[in-house]
Amino acid sequence: MQKGNIGVTTENIFPIIKKFLYSDHEIFLRELVSNAVDATQKLNTLASIGEFKGELGDLTIHVELGKDTITISDRGIGLTAEEMDKYTGWVSILPSW
């Protein structure tokens, strides 16, 4: 078997992600729901160790289908910039909007 390296730079990673991951609607939807699960799990974990003092409330992830839309909603907490850098290394390559 021949061995080699694959090089991915910041200039070409987002087109690759868009084309091969997010162009498939089922994968895209699953990724959005997965992100919502991660966000609600983070909130639940922070509450269990005493770092979140508020009321958890309903942590159900809701998916609503409209005529031309899909809405996914949750009450979770997303990643901070520091967490994104620590866990994904993406902060340095994200566009500044």
Image (tube, rainbow, N blue to C red):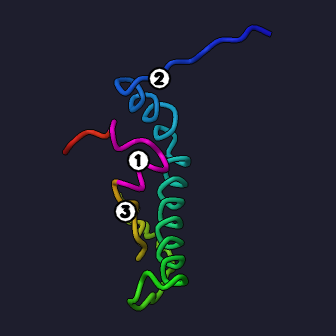
- Locate residue 21, reporting x and y percent: 51, 38
Q: Is 35 displayed left or right of 70 in the figure?
A: right
Question: Residue 80 occupies which quadrant of the picture?
Answer: bottom left
- Residue of label 1: 85
Label 3's element? loop
Q: In the picture, which quadrant includes the C terminus?
A: top left
- As for residue 85 lying within the magenta part, the answer is yes
Question: Residue 69 occupies which quadrant of the picture?
Answer: bottom left
Distance of label 1 from label 3 (alpha carbons): 37 Å
Task: Please provide the residue range marked out in magenta.
Answer: 82-93
Q: Is residue 21 above or below residue 82?
A: above
Instruction: Name the residue located 51 percent from the left edge and 61 percent from the top edge.
Output: 33
Instruction: Name the residue located 65 percent from the left edge and 12 percent from the top edge.
Output: 4
Distance of label 1 from label 2 (alpha carbons): 17 Å
Which numbered mark, 1 or 2, is in the foreground of this view?
Answer: 1
Q: Which of marks 1 and 2 is nearer the N terminus?
A: 2
- Locate residue 1, reporting x and y percent: 80, 10
- Label 1 sits on what residue type? Asp
Crowding at label 1, few (<14), some or many (≥20) Cα neighbours within 10 Å? some
Which numbered mark, 1 or 3, is in the foreground of this view?
Answer: 1
Label 2's element? loop
Q: In this view, does 62 lie above or below 79?
A: below
- As for residue 51 lying within the magenta part, the answer is no
Q: Kindly check if marks 1 and 2 are in contact, taking CB atoms under 8 A apart as contact.
A: no
- Residue of label 3: 67
Q: Is the magenta stretch mostly helix, strand or loop?
A: helix
- Label 3 sits on what residue type? Lys
